Amino acid sequence: MLAFLASLLAGGFGSMVGIGGGLIIVPVLTLALGVDIKVAIAASLIGVIATSTTATATYLRAGLADRRLGLFLLVATAAGGVTGGITAGLLDGRTLAGIFGLFLLLVAVQMSRQRGVEEPRSADGTTPAELVSTYIEPRTGQEIPYRARRLGPAALASLVAGNVSGLLGVGGGIINVPTMNLMMGVPIRVATTTSTYMLGATAAASALIYYAAGLLDPVLAGPVALGVFIGARGGAFVAGLVSHEVLRYAFILVALVFAVQMLLRWSQTG
Amino acid sequence: MRVEARQLPPRAPSRLTARTLTIGSLVSALFFLGGVVLDALGRSNGVANLLDPRAIAAALVGLQAWGWSTVGVIVLIATPAAGLIATALEYRRPEPRSALLAMAVLGVLAVSLAIALIR
């Protein structure tokens, strides 16, 4: 019941700041409920898959997620998810807590510097390293064309995103979205929905490793998945009532508190 | 500066993929819900071997929380793979290259499964 409530809050808050629940679920399960960090990461991955499969169905029907781009990047991201899952099995809990704390600090710093991303402009001329596609803008119903550039570097960044997802159970959105939006020039709406589409297969690749290693506790994963599922829907509703700036600062504050606690755990000897 | 209309690829249908993901999510959520309810009712005798299909089936029939939650986990993990198969089917005619990419991602998932079982 506690895991369900924690995941409900994590899923709600995570979706409100557009970053998924994993960044909050893992510290909450570890610090508040005393769950082993590897078991918490495995449960979080199940929450990531639940969020991705549920949201992607909606995004596909709305014509928002770019599956062609997602599939191209997914090959690298899923491979990263496998290596991340294997790496996590080789590290001890204390080291993982330290890495998680550092990652949270980096996310908090990145979010504090974020000042809104401009919609990229399309450019003439196609090269082999570009993908041309369209999405349907929900506010106007118009089909808007765009061009995704720098496919090679983006695939490398996706490999890193998959690795982080498998290693820390946080999904790779925090890396995938800026990669697609800033590096590739994909509109932010397409970047977030395509990232969500990619997270399911990426997290599944890692979850298989955790499952076979006996680190996935299904009795814990069940409430986590249900909590994230319900919380994410509630959070999306509440997000419309609160300003993005307030949510951003709230997330930075929570991330910093968890980062300090995780780093304290890492600093403890034995 | 606009992208020329002639450069745009045909939009592949996505209904099958969306439906597959929705069904997978709902089925797994039902099993998870069953697991949570059974756990709340005290029908939780600890988790047995997650790689033993017979033990999982027995726990499912015996209304053990871990059996229901494990089936939920398996269905949920399989859902993105099923979605990729649906995507490959939808893309096979308008864009075979994307269908191949979907199969390549499925290949990575198969490698992950093989590594998991070997380890």
Image (tube, grey):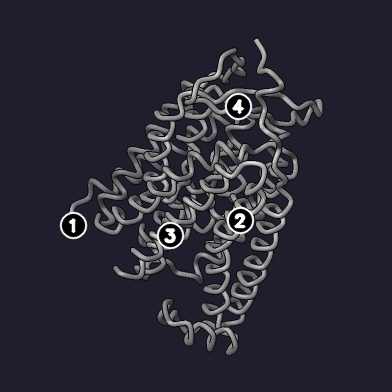
- Measured as percent of width and height from the top left, residue A216 is found at 42, 66
| Type of the residue with mark 3 | Ala
Q: Which marked residue is nearer to the observer: mark 1 or mark 2?
A: 2
> Are discs 4 and 1 located on one and the same chain?
yes
In the rendered image, which residue does mark 3 sit on?
A42
Q: Specify whether A85 is left or right of A149.
A: left
Q: Which marked residue is nearer to the observer: mark 3 or mark 1?
A: 3
Q: Which marked residue is nearer to the observer: mark 4 or mark 2?
A: 4
| Type of the residue with mark 4 | Val
In the rendered image, which residue does mark 2 sit on?
B83
Chain under numbered label 1: A
10 Å crowding of disc 3: few (<14), some (14-19), many (20+): many
Q: Specify whether A267 is left or right of A46.
A: left
Q: Which marked residue is nearer to the observer: mark 2 or mark 3?
A: 2
Q: A31 or A239: nearer the eye?
A: A239
Give the vertical position of B107 relative to A13 (above or below). Answer: below
Q: Quadrant of residue A39?
A: bottom left
In the rendered image, which residue does mark 4 sit on?
A132
10 Å crowding of disc 2: few (<14), some (14-19), many (20+): many
- Measured as percent of width and height from the top left, residue A13 is found at 59, 43
- Dot 2 lies on which element? helix
In the rendered image, which residue does mark 1 sit on?
A270
- Measured as percent of width and height from the top left, residue A124 is found at 59, 12
